[in-house]
Amino acid sequence: MSHHECGHGDGHDEPARDYEVDHHLSDAERNIHRAWDNSLDPVLTVEPGEVVRFECRDAVDRQLDLQSTDEDFANVSFDPVHPLTGPVAVEGAEPGDVLEVELLDLQHKGWGYTGFMPGEMGLGLLPEDFPDAKVHVWDLQGDTGSFVNGIEVELDPFPGVIGVAPGADGEHDTLPPYDTGGNMDVKHMTAGSTVYLPVETEGALFSTGDCHAAQGDGEVCVTGIEAPMFVTARFNVRKDMEIEQPQLRTSGPFTPTGRDEPMYATTGISDDLMDATKRAVRHMIDHLEAERDLTRGEAYILCSAAVDLKVSEVVDAPNWTVTAYVPDSIFPDE
């Protein structure tokens, strides 16, 4: 069947893309799995060049909705987490090949959430700073997500988890990324990007999920704007490539809004890169609290959704520099 699919966002104001969707995978339980495992039977087998539209559940598998509270978020179960749609086998893919995944379209469903868990769980960059859980449920309209105080974050959806089955037998947790991809949370894997995944098992066994409507580079509070979504992708098998870990070709966004524009930045300087990262984010939280009238919890959430971390310097021993950037334009007075 032929479909003229629309671009990212909700599709109302994007030009039509001219391609056919060959297969639709719903988020029905029969198409969902929760661990990487090369012994799983594929729910679908496709030929190279075919296009699949995946319906993906949110990261915590429908435990939250538009009415969810901080307490609801604190009580989310992580056993298991990351429902993945798939796996899809691609004919002709063999260990040593590369699976080429063209991301054609990503469509959110109008809502999402960003939050952090109780500090005792040890998740996120600064669990020691935030003992109590907090969540913000986003209203997503087109290419914009609404935060507090009139702040609006531009959306560029991408799949947080995108990968193929590891070659090692057995079940593998979906939380960490692997050589074969998985929970990489690379915000530049947007519509129009191509992701290259090293194949370690016959058919590749591709799956995706954990979609984000937007995310700051770093995803510091442990969530981006988590959102149920549709992901449309075209698959090809590359026998002329050899890679050890995922690679990608992308046009961004390379800033929180996709534009070069005025930003405010804080630095973190330390002899340890992770400590420098924490310092940069803490200083940004201080800034957002003092200058933008946000609570520290709101500032932490905004950092995860719309603040980009960059490794600015790793050569001036003994100290390294990490910088956190927030765009002026997301605030209503700019």
Image (cartoon, grey):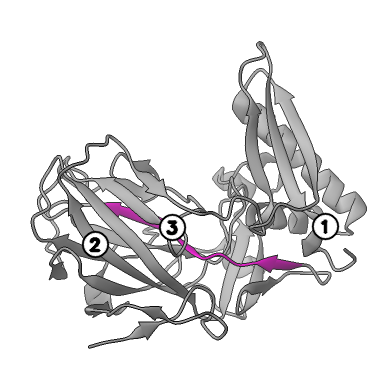
Q: Which residue is mark 2?
A: 235
Going from N to C along the chain, the mark reached first, 1 or 2, is 2
Going from N to C along the chain, the mark reached first, 3 or 1, is 3
Label for residue 295? 1
Q: Alpha-carbon distance for marks 3 and 1? A: 27 Å
Residue toward you, 203 or 29: 203
Going from N to C along the chain, the mark reached first, 3 or 2, is 3
Q: Is 316 displayed left or right of 207 in the figure?
A: right
Residue 276 against residue 136 in the figure, above or below: above
What residue range appears in magenta?
A: 152-165
Q: Residue at x 51, y 82 (%)?
A: 11
Residue 47 against residue 128 in the figure, above or below: below
* Kind of element beneath mark 1: loop
Q: Amino acid at mark 2?
A: Phe
Q: Residue at x 22, y 37 (%)?
A: 242
Residue 147 against residue 124 in the figure, above or below: below
Q: Is residue 157 magenta?
A: yes
Verify CB contact (< 8 Å) between mark 1 and mark 2: no
